Image (cartoon, coloured by chain):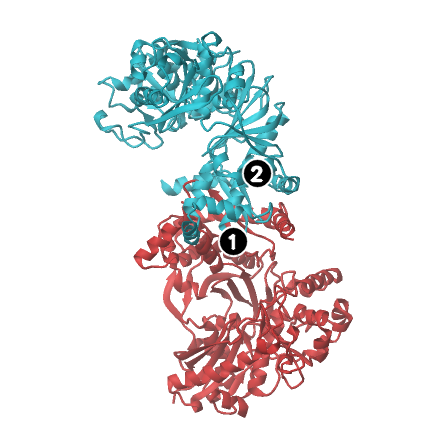
Chain colours: A cyan, B red
Amino acid sequence: MPKYAIGIDFGTESGRALLVDVADGREVATYVHSYANGVIDERLPADAGGVRLEPDWALQDPNDYIEVFKRAVPAVLKASGVSPADVIGLGIDFTACTMLPTVADGTPLCFLPQYRGRPHAWVKLWKHHAAQPEANKLNEIARQRGDAFLDRYGGKISSEWFVPKAWQILDEDPEIYAAADRLIEASDWVIWQLTGRESRNLTTAGYKGIWSKHDGFPPDDFFRALAPGLEHLVEDKLSREISELGAKAGGLTAEAARWTGLLPGTAVAIANVDAHVAVPASTVVEPGRMVIIMGTSNCHMVLGTEEHIVPGMCGYVEDGIIPGFFGYEAGQSCVGDHFAWFTENCVPAAYEREAQARGISVHQLLEEKAGQLKPGESGLLALDWWNGNRSVLVDVDLTGLLIGATLLTKPEEIYRALIEATAYGTRIIIETFQANGVPIHQIVATGGLPDRNKLLMQIYADVSGRPIVVAGTHQGGGLGSAMHGAVAAGAAAGGYDSIVEAAQHMAALRDESYTPNPDAKAVYDQLFAEYVTLHDYFGRGANDVMKRLKLLKAQARS
Amino acid sequence: MPKYAIGIDFGTESGRALLVDVADGREVATYVHSYANGVIDERLPADAGGVRLEPDWALQDPNDYIEVFKRAVPAVLKASGVSPADVIGLGIDFTACTMLPTVADGTPLCFLPQYRGRPHAWVKLWKHHAAQPEANKLNEIARQRGDAFLDRYGGKISSEWFVPKAWQILDEDPEIYAAADRLIEASDWVIWQLTGRESRNLTTAGYKGIWSKHDGFPPDDFFRALAPGLEHLVEDKLSREISELGAKAGGLTAEAARWTGLLPGTAVAIANVDAHVAVPASTVVEPGRMVIIMGTSNCHMVLGTEEHIVPGMCGYVEDGIIPGFFGYEAGQSCVGDHFAWFTENCVPAAYEREAQARGISVHQLLEEKAGQLKPGESGLLALDWWNGNRSVLVDVDLTGLLIGATLLTKPEEIYRALIEATAYGTRIIIETFQANGVPIHQIVATGGLPDRNKLLMQIYADVSGRPIVVAGTHQGGGLGSAMHGAVAAGAAAGGYDSIVEAAQHMAALRDESYTPNPDAKAVYDQLFAEYVTLHDYFGRGANDVMKRLKLLKAQARS
């Protein structure tokens, strides 16, 4: 009898279940359930009193996650006709850091009537940016103390990560902080709901929680230096017991079996992160091949056999992606978002009419027109910092730049320059890794963009000088989670004993690749040299005009 | 009986006659005649064989100028009901350098059947740019020889000017060069047609012909250094007799009287240039007030009592605008053109729909939205070099730059940044004059933009820190020419004995002015400092990326 595993990918707006064949990774059925309360960024829900939120807040409702189990899992079982008895394991991946306060039994504080109207009782979504003051203070204090962990994270802890978010609760609503027996990643919380026992996964702990296999969490005196009330954060509200990826978190409880329609005791894997499970789902379980998840932003992941401090990267975690390797992560905060911004704000009506008349999207029209240009032909160069720079400058206050415009400059030329700029940004990341002992000889692309923009793919190959292959799955999160579910079940139950084995059987590449064109590469080498000069001039302190403009902007708006 | 004067403004596409009351400058009647052959930039007219022109060529048909006399002057006489006996004088202004070859009696070579099919026999319009190789060689040779005249022209002779154009004829069609008894500005040629005698005006000689009151033309050995055949250019085909502005060129011939309907003998002023006659027409006849003609490009003119070499300006000519003063000229090659480019290429369909729904133009909508922004609020800064930089860098290979873009940047913010950039460009020109001994305390605006864009006017006042007043006339060329006609007639005939007197009576300011807002000025001072840093970094050799991008572009297109 074939065996199956289910992966559940918890995104920003919805959760998706994917049921796959364990033998070959074939995707049998999928179902998406949108969160009823979505992203809560203006007011708390009406039944919580509708309190207005401050700017930069972004919350979620943990009940929406439970609903994904109740809706999406039964739906894929039904659609596939697969018997629950043949589903050997379940894995999940989640956005991160997305975290919440609970009482000791795991009940979210926002489920308790006395706290429901308090914003800090809810889930803080990854893009909740209101802990920036705490992040700034944390970085300042860590620098002054000389805490070594900063080096692992490119010199900066993000306001999106766990400790700033926890500290914001203490700062702004100490009663909630005190009432929170546990502060936990939402990924670990949903596993808790499935298995009835709390676990903490290595990936979020390592990438978002300032934890490492070697050093554990920062010492209590670091937390005390932040704020006296934080001193015992780890002891009181987190856990020093961190579980390896692919490990079994437990079996489904009777209640979770009722929610999902699966059998009680079905193996459940330790939680994981969306980007990170996409790596083995893209066939990458060894060093040398970089996975880039290309979408609104780019996330770059590569494995290394040794520990290297690579300046300006988001972080590296031992065993953080694939056990046995250091998992390095970098990012570009604005890729598809660039093109969406451009299409919405800068494409003239004549182009919209042409696209309509031809029954294609404006994006397709732009890609077609931009595809007729040769490298260098537009005379344009851009810095891809419309949303700051995540790697290697790690500076949210950098902004976008376009140079080379003339009265003959056309929209498709600007569009192509924006694509090229993101390719240069990726090349800087690749070259920084390479120069710091993490070699990269091939790119494995996954995410939404590889399907939608073949021009972009060829430009990335030409600019980076690396061949690009494309992951076979469109559901890197769901497939990667299902693979981890199969590993949690183990070979004895019809699954696998390691994620490497699982990848060999369940992951594949598409029959589609992009080879660098030497002529294009030669021109792009020259353009990239110009990009690097501008990147360093504006990004490394020679001229901080971008920051001063941002300051003037803030003053004008205040 | 009231007396009248007529000014004729020969533009790029048409000629306009303006009949004004000499007593107060009241504009009584105006008429525009479009040139039948317009700008000839693809093929010669069919009756000339339709020869295809090379890129960068721009010719005109001298017969079109005569048609303006035949159509536009009778039309204003008829419309006004003014008796020809009461028209005391006629003046003209012309684009420059716009030049043509003629035989000794003034007949254009292109009127002669044997030369009609030869492109070099026609009028070379100001924007004929095909003499760039000659201009480059000329500048190189003059630099090597250390010819001092280069300093008077910001270090560079433009390909638009007289000597490169004459040299191009010799280079490419020596037979036409040999057949040309005269090479003459079209402005002087039309005066010749009206009066029957050849004259050469000081303004075009000084600003476009490398002539100065003190040094005359460059010596013959300079021309010989360019090309042996050019050695006697001045002696053979030009004239060393240069006439002062406002002087009387002569009286209307009987034939010209028949063309125009005016009386034979009517006083005709020495020719002039469109921008330069606009200065007294804007009331400016003394130092300290800068006239800016604002349109597709900006032309800045200011008078000085002493001779100063101001680096990077288009040129200065003693007596070149108003007798008794040094007339300084600077320019920005792209102002209204910026906004037209932006509107055509970068304004989304949603804005076009909103403008249509409200019955306003896209420009008006953008101005309205941009007007709601405070200085600095967009966070954007631009370098206004979409069409190169005419002053003070004098570099056509510079290109446009925009910095500070984010995912929230709106079209109206970019639009405002472009306006601000042109204002910073004007401020650099003003400050360069000021720093080099040519003070400027007020701006007098004229041209098309002051009417169309009040936001721009206020921004110019705020950025420059100078009050701006607006010229009363919309026809700076026509009024200025009519004023020169009144001076040619003289006080005894009911006119004036000097252009200063004429300006006191005939020119006026509008009841409209713009005062710098100190708060806005304070913000703009900070933004201007950033502009200057980028201006110098990209414009003065620290990073020649703009030129290298242009080179790559040329290579990609070759």
A246 is higher (above) or lower (below) than A404: above
The reply to whether residue A172 is visible in this rendering is no
Picture coordinates of residue A199 (x, y %)?
Answer: 40, 11
Picture coordinates of residue A320 (x, y %)?
Answer: 50, 17
Q: How far apart are marks 2 and 1 (CA)?
A: 33 Å
Same subunit under labels 2 and 1? no
Q: Please, what is the three-letter code of the amino acid marked with disc 2?
A: Gln
Specify whether A289 is left or right of B68. Answer: right
Chain letter of the residue carrying label 1:
B
- Label disc, if present, on residue B66 of the rendered structure: none
A172 or B247, nearer to the observer: A172
Picture coordinates of residue A231 (x, y %)?
Answer: 40, 12
The reply to whether residue A98 is visible in this rendering is yes
Name the residue beneath numbered marker 1.
Answer: B384
Q: Which image quarter: residue A85?
A: top left
Name the residue beneath numbered marker 2.
Answer: A458
Q: Please, what is the three-letter code of the amino acid marked with disc 1?
A: Asp
Q: Which image quarter: residue A193?
A: top left
Secondary structure of residue under mark 1:
loop
A347 or A500, nearer to the observer: A500
A237 is higher (above) or lower (below) than A463: above
Specify whether A454 is left or right of A96. Answer: right
Residue drawn at (39%, 28%), measured in percent from left and top? Answer: A127
Picture coordinates of residue B450 (x, y %)?
Answer: 41, 63
Specify whether B89 is left or right of B453. Answer: right
Task: State the quadrant of the N terminus of chain B.
Answer: bottom left
B455 is higher (above) or lower (below) than A374: below
Q: Residue furthest front?
A: A1
